[in-house]
Amino acid sequence: MVERRVLDPAVSMTPAPERAVGPPLASPGASQGAVRATRNRRGRLVGVLVGRRLAWTVPLLAVISLGIFALAALSPADATTGFLGARGEFTPASSRDNVEELLGHGTWLESWLAWAGSTLTGDPGWSTAYRAPVAEIVAARLPWTVLIMATGVLSAAVLSVVLALGVALTPHHPVSRTVVGGLWAVTALPSFLVSLGLMAVFAIGLGWLPAGGLTNPGADLTAGQVATHMVLPTAAVAVSQVPWMSLHLHEALRAQLNGPAVEAARVRGLSEPTIVARHALPAAAIPVVAIAGTRLPEIVAGAAVVELVLSWPGLGQALVEAALAQDLALLATVGVLLTAASLLGGLLADVALVALDPRTDPREL
Amino acid sequence: MRTVPHRARRRRTSSSVLALAVAVALTSCSTGGTATTAESGAGLRLAESTEYASLHPLDHPLGITTKFYDGLVNVGENGALEPGLAAQMPTPDEDLTTWTVQLRQDVTFSDGSNFTADDVLAAYDAVRDPAMGSWMAADYAMVDAVTALGEHTVEFKLSHSYAGLPARLTLGIPASEALGDSVLHSSLAAEPVGTGPYVLEDWRRGESMALSSRDDWWAGDPEVERIDIAFVPDENARAQRLRSGEFDGAQLSPRLAAALDGVNDLELVTNPSGDFRGISLPQSLPFFQDPQVRTAVNLATDRQAMIDGILQGHGRPLATPMTPAQGDSYEPSARFDHDPARAAELLDGAGWTLTVDGVREKDGRQFSFALMYFAEDTLRRDLAQAFASDLSELGIRVELEGVDRSQAAASMEDKAFVLGGGDLPYDADTQVYRQVSSDFADYDPDDPYSNPSGYADEQVDRLLAESREEADPQIRAGLYRELQTRLVQNPPMVSLMALEHTYVAQGLDRWDGLAPVVEPHEHGVAWGPWWNVESWTRP
């Protein structure tokens, strides 16, 4: 059996070039029942895909956390030195031995087994860097990171669609050229510079927005305070995502707008806005969505810098601190969370791909 | 009239492109005040550079914990020790091995319980208990036993005479029932229970902390009722937010602090410190076994140029680890003037002669060594570069190595190192002993920073021992002055300078009671002009 045709008989009935633009264009030629049956079948296959991926997740996370412990053992830095930090310079030998004893010893494998066993029972251990339970630290910080990442990526997506459409529809306009050039330039800007720049302009220069933290110094933690304070970190996350998103989208849109599917639609007399909104944009979004899932870890890494500069109490800051202090329980827990998040991101991107592109076979993903 | 005398003269240098760039960036922005314009009548808003890992007094002494805890002895104006929870300064017996401390009777902890001798016993047992894991345990190794002579009297029995004990009694005393099993797992790391002027109101991890004053502190109600501390690790961000008026103060590097001095209502405030920097001269290297060579290297070092160029003038040149902050114990005539010509003579005399390629040699061995500095520490990096440049003019090759702490510890025996000291400058003994005593001359990878040069001098050891046994403060100070004279005759290392810690603040004139202090190596918003914030009053 040849999957694609069987997967979507409705599509297979339409001329080949039109398949690329998907069901909306193809469905007039197919019966309602056939479409429903196809949807059900694809739904089941997506379920299988999700199950298969999740089954892989657990062993993968185990290997990743094992790797973190093994690599830490190879690194010249040791936990005692990390724990003592700057005080190490004033710590005589016998005190140092006590601290070493306190932090525990044993091989990296034993440490990992202890951590993994404890994590399976719901307690991911004790953070040496923060002298507190890992679960408490993660629970306190994760929401803040998710907040600026989710809003940042979402606003980046909206802005990218606007920019890419604008540029793709008026490719020869001087503004379009400037925008594309500008986007390439922004790609080269490191996160800390973006964050500091945003702060200098919008917080210090114009005085429109607060420069950092969750609230003004000493203010209560209210939704209003957080809403104004999250603007800059969100913008900083968004600014780092807009260039690649919009440039990819722009390229894909240009290809679509000059492609045979759109030609065919034009021949059939569909209006230009309909063609762009219903045919070109969904098709162009496919590669961008596919990339987005895999770029999640990078977004988190960028967020760590944003968090540091804008004093945003997220997980990225804690990750850096854990690495510097050789705080393995926290490092491994955050590492596992990040891995899980990017696996989930990849999965969501794939599911979105199946939904957007009828040619995609869930069994091949 | 304010009393902070070390307010620095404003100074701008164009020596650094960075300083200039930052200054331009800062001054080119308009003055837009952000959301926080509310006059904080009885409060302070400060920005701290690093979040505290722990608030446990046995894990984090002499910093923010001094707001939550008192020691038996506290650090007072100009760095003088004064009674804290002790009713008067501890009194020793004749041979300084038994010290008796009368305790205040009117003191309660923030949880409402009474402060008694049991709390003192518990704290000093805990700090010495290996299982507690306090990094200060070894500092109390001379304490054999602490006993209660009554509900409000304790006695310290020492294994040897020790005149420097009062400085060690600055340890913060928590409520004994809250001590916990170890500094790692104790609830005190996040929930202080002390006798100090403030309590922890709120701690938003990674973001900020709020302190509020107690209304039952034994020394009276603080008029600064609330202190909000935001954690702003990025120094440029800290400088920008200070400039916008969001904070009343923060610590900044000398360069950034100078750039902000006089901008808006900000002013530069400095405190002297016992925080010194030096360069070890490991005697495993043959050339550093010769005192003449060590003297030559000291004479070749242009300390004042480092202070002016790197610290914007905020430092005092040193010849030994002893600093002017040690008061009568400091010997001002013990100094190394910058004299490269004399240094060259000494090296020639010692047989290290210049070769055609400009590097000195003796018996076929080049005068060349590696100098390590902590890679993340820009001050130590700059000092290492300046030192290498001074020595290269003399025909000595110095290879710089930026290292992490583990690498530094592993290579300390045969590589020079830019070291820092002054963790407890309130007694001459705690300032200098570990640096120069032959007790620590043998390299120990677990204790690489004590006497990192592997220096041993009989006269120095004798003076260190005698001053520990001397009860008369004036005679004792004289012994330390003699020690410095000897340390210049036979230098263990190149002591560079004592730092002045630099802060930027606004609104200080709204308060009376500001005073200078001597800061330890530790710095931050618990020091600076705010170190005695609990006793500030409204004019």
Image (cartoon, grey):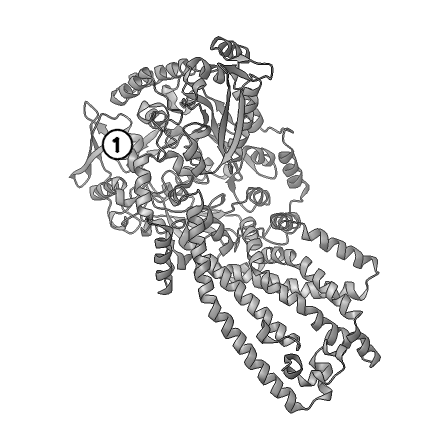
- Rendered position, B249 above or below A170: above
At mark 1, the secondary structure is loop
**Residue A85 percent location from the top left of the image:** 42, 41
For badge 1, the amino acid type reads: Gln
The one nearer the camera, B538 or A274, is A274
The one nearer the camera, A96 or B47, is A96
**Residue B203 percent location from the top left of the image:** 42, 53
Residue B105 appears in which quarter of the rendering?
top left
- Rendered position, A60 above or below B230: below
Q: Is residue A64 left or right of residue A194?
A: left
Q: Is residue B26 left or right of residue B133?
A: right
Residue B517 appears in which quarter of the rendering?
top left
Residue A5 appears in which quarter of the rendering?
bottom right
- Rendered position, B135 above or below B518: below
Chain ID at mark 1: B
Q: Residue at x 30, y 21 (%)?
A: B464
Residue under label 1, please give it.
B88
The one nearer the camera, B192 or B398, is B398
Neighbor class of circle 1 (other Cα within 10 Å; few <14, some 14-19, many 20+) is some
Tell me if residue B1 can be seen: no
Tell me if residue B264 can be seen: yes
**Residue B383 percent location from the top left of the image:** 53, 28
- Rendered position, B350 above or below A365: above
The one nearer the camera, B454 or B326, is B454
